[in-house]
Amino acid sequence: MAQADLVVPTWNGRGLLERCLPTLVGQAGVARLVVVDNGSTDGTAEMLAERFPSVAVVALAENRGFARAVNAGVAAGAAEHVVLVNNDVECDPGFVAALSGALARDSGAGMAAGLLLTPRRERVDSYGLEVDRTLAAFPRFACARWPAALHERGLALPSGGAAAYRRDALAAAGGFDDALFGYMEDVDVGLRLAAAGWRCAGAPQASGTHLGSASFGQRSRWQVEVSGFARGYMLRKYGVLGSGLGPAAWALGVELGVVAVDAMKERDLTALQSRLRGWGAARGRRASAPAEAINPELGPAEGLRRRRRVISGAGDPETRR
């Protein structure tokens, strides 16, 4: 069985970790279980020392974001594979082995996607991500009733909440981009791996329950700021606005719509200002998204339909976030 280092970033998530870690301790195929504590002040360190002494802890002095935390956790291990789990995910037995096994069976796969279900396990939260020409990423099968007939068509990359990577491929790609504090880090690293010729494998047996939006709150202003920064950063880093009139107009239309709606609802310009900050931060950083990572079926109309579906939860209050 291929061995994997299991990395769980956290920030003031003591209650979440108390539910997450018991589902990870003792899983087969784990070389090292590492919790990266992003400067928590809620007693996380004390809880880990008391209840989970076998877990390796990387303690950061302050909250440095998801990407930096993941990079620190990866550096703390040496196993062939790296498995990432969000602290708001409760994993089923065999989760790590299934993800690592998907990479072991496919020499061309540099990353693998697990299956996340909503809290009552009646619907799919995500089975990996697919990407449109503006680099907007969509959770695959989101809100589909579970059990569902899953497939890998359009699977571009894993969600960072349930993902596995080949250590050597991740290192060659430069790891996670530490300029991204939160949101789209998984999209960015997945696109860079795809550009290097790596595929994403599906691992539906690697299943777990995802609480959703636990780190940033339910559409909090901080969430708007962090996600807006990430969007502006990605648009410039990947040259989306210079990739042709169609994709540029499409991307601008979506972003202006999001900014306008948020400004009218909240009576501030957080969504716009954060995008501008992200755009500025991406100056001098360049990457390209390979055509094979883009799902041509994801046009503007389909993207809008999916956004509405996720927001509405397909009529199920549990999936709204």
Image: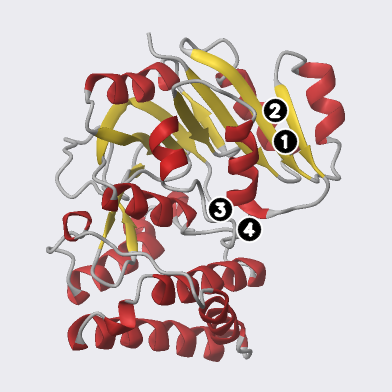
Quadrant including the N terminus = top left
From the top left corner, tell me how far across and down residue 89 is, in percent.
Answer: 53, 35
For label 1, the SS is helix
Q: Point out the tag, 2 or 3, that comes first from the N-terminus.
A: 2
Residue type at the position of mark 3: Ser
Residue drawn at 47 percent across, 30 percent down: 83
Q: Point out the tag, 4 or 2, that comes first from the N-terminus.
A: 2
Task: Answer with the quarter of the image where residue 101 lies.
Answer: top left
Residue type at the position of mark 1: Gly
Can you see residue 121?
no
From the top left corner, tell me how far across and down residue 139 is, in percent.
Answer: 33, 52
Residue 278 falls left or right of residue 97: right
**For the residues bearing labels 4 and 1, Cβ distance under 8 angstroms:** no
Check disc 4 and report the residue beneath it. Answer: 217
For label 3, the SS is loop
**For the residues bearing labels 3 and 1, Cβ distance under 8 angstroms:** no
Label at residue 18: 2
Label at residue 15: 1
